[in-house]
């Protein structure tokens, strides 16, 4: 403590603090003699709400959050970055602190005792003027509601093994963040002074995929502690993101200790700081990881490598203690071969930790020319590649700009969802989460399993011939539904195989309903076949699924358009598709059918003897069989579900209601009409869709 609080250190720090910048050299000395420098660890409290004022504070490095506390709930959160001062209002008024100040990272704070600060203030009119102007600006910001201080997020990318493409991933993530959020991003590459490529243990792909800098790096020891020199070393206007290329000497322990302070020094200047760390794990790398808001751990699916990533997680848990948050530590699997040999479930069990996602392998045809840059070369993929889609999805999640697609129930009417998906694919509208209920769950599951709209259409066409519906009919005793569901499950397995939620190309949630507890159940793990089977179990028509003490039926009974599930998962851009018919639609459809029957009844026997006889036989059968129990149940349910869906639609940013007038809930054979209606509904809102996902909507309001 004595070393960091030395007069020379204090003097250098005072000169860097904006509120003291207009003072002369003599005043800087006077302030430095009264100041002390205090180091705080991540999570430490600098000053607590309702405590008496004792110091004037200036943040030298790190990050703080200021908030009010009510019943242990944080409110009115603001962020304090390097160079900002705080605690001044309490000092001037003598009142207790109205906020709690907590270190988000390891932080260094310059503190001047209250009595000493009051003496300095009386003897330095210029300082009083500076503080007065700062307070006036703060009051104006509070009145107008305009915030000029934004939250910065540090994202550290680390792999304990070589050959995972972690550096390439880090660079692509930084660029995707800028594209998706339109905010200020810096990519920081930190590496030893010499990167050996002669090590036989290094996979050849690691060399191909590694970054290639065209400009020399700067030494961490030359710039750390001097914010002006750090910013001078930043490469600007070369790529859409800023760049910082930093090296350290492998044997210089002091230099390694400066990595974390260097990264923390960039917060406040950028919304996102993406840090590419060296592969070798030591205490300094772990320290940087613990100071990060998010840690992305890249690893192959080799058992040896999985063991190494488990040790990293253990070390982070040990260092962070109660501050450890599993959602901030994301394990990303990069398959060692073109496909993964271990399932996600096997990997989860192996490392006793949930895998976040996997990075698809990159095919030669996926590659594209790198962005023109005078400083950096790295592997980039076509936007249509699965690798690029995955990185963009991660970037949108980090940036809080994810797009959710909600596909509602509606039996055969749900085939219209395919038309909506066709337009989304054609127009490259990104989707980061799909939530489906009933028939919407079935379409969502097949789509998220990796099939495209054209393949979905082929699946739907299996039932263009009405007789093919009989392939799903298996009566069951005792009767809890007209259809047992065994053949439905077999049909689902034909299209979904053994795929699980983990293997879905887009995060997927499926809604079902527990008849016993009368509550919705969100299924997001396990077999896709089992989940869909639960969600399509129309009461009285298809038998329920018993799981333990649950009796699970059609998710549409309680939540036919589950926009709430998207919203509760942090999705802030929601597209909802409701295929259920309104009362007006049903009435109009009835009138259409009635007119068609009247026209057919007018045809004479002599014009078409077979048609005449067939029409009357069919009409007689319909009068005898209608309304049947299935029709009564489904129409009753859909009447209620439509009202619920209209309420749920209020949570959606974009709402589609395809025109399906005249199509019945059981008419799976009308594929062309259903898909065309969905396509038309999506095209009608296409300008709104493009606007919703545009990065222009994500521009920062300030700074």
Image (cartoon, rainbow, N blue to C red):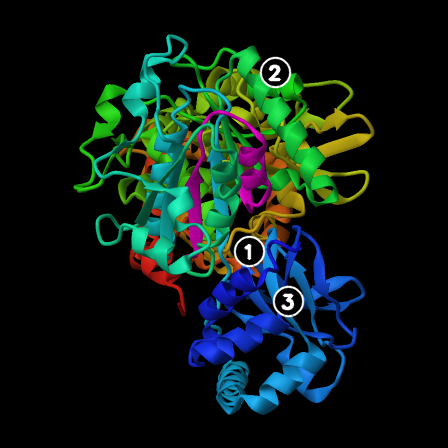
Disc number lying in front (1 or 2): 1
Distance (Cα) linking label 2 and label 3? 42 Å
User: In the displayed structure, does residue 373 sit left or right of residue 461?
Assistant: left
At 66% from the left edge and 44% from the top edge, which residue is drawn?
557
Disc number lying in front (1 or 3): 1
Give x and y (percent) for residue 442. 52, 32
What residue did someone put label 3 on? 66
State whether residue 462 appears in this view: yes
Q: Nearer the viewer, residue 186 or 478?
A: 186
Distance (Cα) linking label 1 and label 2? 39 Å
Give x and y (percent) for residue 586. 49, 53
State whether residue 632 appears in this view: no
Q: Residue 274 colored magenta?
A: yes
Q: What is the magenta range? A: 270-294
User: In the displayed structure, does residue 502 sit left or right of residue 94?
Assistant: left
Q: Nearer the viewer, residue 458 or 649?
A: 649
- The residue sitting at the top extreme is 200
At 53% from the left edge and 60% from the top edge, which residue is drawn?
9
Disc number lying in front (2 or 3): 3
Quarter of the figure that contains the C terminus: bottom left
Q: Which mark is residue 62?
A: 1
Mark 3 neighbour class, 10 Å CA radius: few under 14, some 14 to 19, many 20 or more = many
Secondary structure of the residue carrying numbered label 2: helix
Compare marks 1 and 2 and give the one earlier in the sequence: 1
Quarter of the figure that contains the N terminus: bottom right
Q: Is residue 139 above or below residue 163?
A: below
At 22% from the left edge and 23% from the top edge, which residue is drawn?
365
User: In the displayed structure, does residue 609 sit left or right of residue 307?
Assistant: left
What residue did someone put label 2 on? 346
Q: Residue 315 colored magenta?
A: no
């Amino acid at each position: 403590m004595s070393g960091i609080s030395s007069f020379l250190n204090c003097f250098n720090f005072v000169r860097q603090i904006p509120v003291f910048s207009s003072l002369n050299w003599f005043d800087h000395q006077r302030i430095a003699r009264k100041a002390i420098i205090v180091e705080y660890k991540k999570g430490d409290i600098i000053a607590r709400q309702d405590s008496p004022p004792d110091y004037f504070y200036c943040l030298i490095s790190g990050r703080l959050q200021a908030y009010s506390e009510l019943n242990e709930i944080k409110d009115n959160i603001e962020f304090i970055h390097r160079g900002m001062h705080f605690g001044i209002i309490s000092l001037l008024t003598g009142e207790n602190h109205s906020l709690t100040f907590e270190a988000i990272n390891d932080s260094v704070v310059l503190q001047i005792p209250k009595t000493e600060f009051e003496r300095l203030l009386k003897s330095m009119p210029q300082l009083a003027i500076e503080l007065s102007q700062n307070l006036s600006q703060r009051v104006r910001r509070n009145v107008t509601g305009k915030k000029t201080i934004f939250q910065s997020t540090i994202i550290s990318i680390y792999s304990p093994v070589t050959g995972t493409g972690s550096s390439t991933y880090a660079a692509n993530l930084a660029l995707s963040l800028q594209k998706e959020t339109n905010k200020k991003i810096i990519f920081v590459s930190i590496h030893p002074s010499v990167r050996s490529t002669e090590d036989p243990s290094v996979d050849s792909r690691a060399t191909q995929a590694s970054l290639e800098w065209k400009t020399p790096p700067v030494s961490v020891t030359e710039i750390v502690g001097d914010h002006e020199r750090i910013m001078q070393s930043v490469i600007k206007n070369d790529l859409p993101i800023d760049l910082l290329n930093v090296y350290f000497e492998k044997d210089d322990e002091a230099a390694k200790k400066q990595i974390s302070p260097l990264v923390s020094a960039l917060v406040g200047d950028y919304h996102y700081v993406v840090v590419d760390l060296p592969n070798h794990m030591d205490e300094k790398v772990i320290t940087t990881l613990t100071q990060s808001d998010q840690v992305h751990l890249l690893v192959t699916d080799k058992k040896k490598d999985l063991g190494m990533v488990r040790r990293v997680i253990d070390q982070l848990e040990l260092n962070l203690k109660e501050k450890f948050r599993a959602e901030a530590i994301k394990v990303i699997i990069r398959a060692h071969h073109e496909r993964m040999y271990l399932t996600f479930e096997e990997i989860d069990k192996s490392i006793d930790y949930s895998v976040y996602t996997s990075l698809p392998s990159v095919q030669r045809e996926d590659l594209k020319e790198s962005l023109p840059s005078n400083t950096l070369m790295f592997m980039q993929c076509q936007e249509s590649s699965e690798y690029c889609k995955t990185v963009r999805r991660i970037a949108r999640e980090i940036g809080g700009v994810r797009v959710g697609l909600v596909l509602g129930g509606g039996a055969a009417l749900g085939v219209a969802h395919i038309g909506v998906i066709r337009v989304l694919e054609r127009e490259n509208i990104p989707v980061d989460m799909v939530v489906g209920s009933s028939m919407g769950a079935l379409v969502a599951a097949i789509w998220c399993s990796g099939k495209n709209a054209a393949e979905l259409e082929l699946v739907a066409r299996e039932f263009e011939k009405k007789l093919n519906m009989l392939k799903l009919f298996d009566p069951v005793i005792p009767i809890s539904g007209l259809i047992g569901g065994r053949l439905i499950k077999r049909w689902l397995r034909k299209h979904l195989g053994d795929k699980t939620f983990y293997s879905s190309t887009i995060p997927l949630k499926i809604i079902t309903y527990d008849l016993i507890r009368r509550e919705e159940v969100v299924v997001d793990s396990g077999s896709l076949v089992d989940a869909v089977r639960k969600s399509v179990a129309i009461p009285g028509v298809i038998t329920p699924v018993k799981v333990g003490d649950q009796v699970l039926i059609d998710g549409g009974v309680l939540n036919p358009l589950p926009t709430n599930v998207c919203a509760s998962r942090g999705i802030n851009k929601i597209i909802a598709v409701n295929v259920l018919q309104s009362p007006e639609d049903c009435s109009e459809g009835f009138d259409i059918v009635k007119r068609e029957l009247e026209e057919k009844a007018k045809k004479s026997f002599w014009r078409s003897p077979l048609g005449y006889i067939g029409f009357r036989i069919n009409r007689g059968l319909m009068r005898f069989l209608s309304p049947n129990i299935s029709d009564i149940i489904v129409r009753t349910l859909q009447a209620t579900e439509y009202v619920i869906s209209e309420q749920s639609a209020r949570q959606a940013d974009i709402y589609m209601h395809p025109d399906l007038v005249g199509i019945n809930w059981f008419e799976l054979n009308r594929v062309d009409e259903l898909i065309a209606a969905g396509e038309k509904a999506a095209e009608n809102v296409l300008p709104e869709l493009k606007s919703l996902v545009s990065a222009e909507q994500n521009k920062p309001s300030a700074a």
